């Protein structure tokens, strides 16, 4: 009985987001921190700062249609939980103190208000199935959702679009808003072992090992959708050959290059909207 009690006991969620705050590294890359070597408190605080910043960036890009869309970050200590936005908060006003911690089972662990049902369904099921994923971004940007109606993946027609070559899946079984568990389960199954997902008649979704890479891939994916839609509207785009596309993908779409690519946007946010840290 004593062993069973220990097994069934819930973990203690002693979370203080005021702990672990690191100083701003300054512009550029030279003072970037290897967050994997930091304490759990520093990893958590760093992650939620990047998450709040990600929502601000989405707002700047116009990816804030009502309550559609959500970005999450897996907690570095309690990996069965993830940080996400509470339902109804504008992306452009998001702060660290607004973020909530949700358990994969739907329980609100930290924060004042729950996230939306669709966000809970999609993110929880992806995290359940993919231990290598630490961040997920989904929204309905204009070009991404328009491209999703074509029922196909992106072609390697530019250097930037090579990032998604053979790394993207399609979820073709749209069955309405993911306000129940089954749609999230189906989306997770469609993603399988890929990194990116085009949700047909819906939008786009990116994943990554950290917030930085996930957000950069999302911005790049929306741009690639725009590029292909424009190219196909005036002619037949010339595809980059397979071997060249693979080599280009491996150079422009790894964690380091994606991380580096996002930093100037984060630096700008630190300068112009520092209240996201509150």
Image: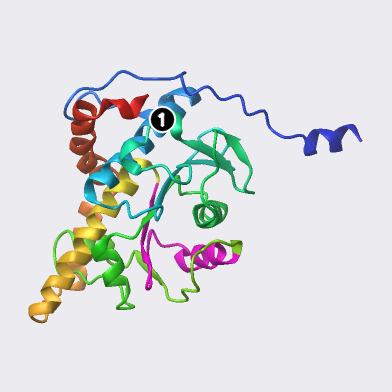
Residue 5 visible from this viewpoint: yes
Q: Note whether 211 is above or below 67 in the view shown.
A: above
Q: Is residue 137 left or right of residue 226?
A: right
Q: Residue at x 24, y 35 (%)?
A: 266
Q: For the C terminus, give its image quadrant.
A: top left
Report the span colored magenta. Answer: 182-208
Q: Residue at x 27, y 66 (%)?
A: 165
Find out whether residue 76 is within the magenta segment: no
Q: Residue at x 23, y 28 (%)?
A: 270
Q: Position of residue 275 (x, y in %)?
A: 30, 26
Q: Note whether 265 is above or below 132 in the view shown.
A: above
Q: Is residue 45 left or right of residue 82?
A: left
Q: Position of residue 272 (x, y in %)?
A: 19, 29
User: In the rendered image, which residue does mark 1 sit on?
Assistant: 96
Q: Is residue 192 left or right of residue 162?
A: right
Find the residue positioned furthest to the right: 1
Residue 79, picture quadrant: top right
Find out whether residue 190 is within the magenta segment: yes
């Amino acid at each position: 009985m004593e062993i069973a009690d220990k097994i069934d006991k819930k973990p203690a969620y002693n979370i203080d987001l005021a702990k672990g705050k690191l100083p701003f590294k300054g512009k550029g890359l030279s003072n970037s921190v290897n967050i994997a070597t930091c304490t759990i408190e520093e990893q958590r605080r760093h992650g939620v700062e990047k998450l709040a910043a990600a929502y601000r960036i989405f707002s700047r890009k116009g990816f804030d249609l009502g309550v559609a869309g959500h970005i999450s970050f897996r907690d570095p200590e309690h990996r069965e939980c993830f940080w996400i936005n509470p339902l109804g908060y504008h992306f452009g006003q998001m702060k660290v103190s607004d973020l909530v911690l949700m358990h994969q089972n739907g329980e609100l662990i930290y924060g004042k208000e729950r996230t939306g049902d669709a966000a809970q369904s999609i993110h929880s099921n992806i995290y359940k199935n993919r231990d290598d994923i630490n961040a997920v971004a989904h929204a309905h940007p204009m070009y991404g959702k328009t491209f999703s109606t074509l029922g196909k993946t992106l072609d390697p027609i530019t250097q930037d679009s090579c990032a998604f070559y053979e790394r993207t899946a399609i979820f073709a079984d749209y069955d309405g808003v993911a306000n129940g568990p089954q749609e999230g389960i189906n989306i997770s199954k469609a993603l399988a072992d890929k990194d990116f997902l085009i949700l047909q008649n819906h939008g786009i979704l990116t994943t990554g090992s950290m917030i930085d890479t996930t957000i950069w891939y999302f911005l790049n994916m929306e741009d690639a959708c725009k590029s292909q839609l424009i190219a196909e509207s005036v002619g037949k785009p010339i595809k980059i050959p397979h071997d060249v596309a693979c080599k280009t993908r491996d150079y422009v779409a790894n964690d380091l290059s994606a991380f580096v690519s996002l930093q100037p946007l984060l630096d700008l946010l630190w300068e112009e909207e520092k209240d996201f840290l509150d």
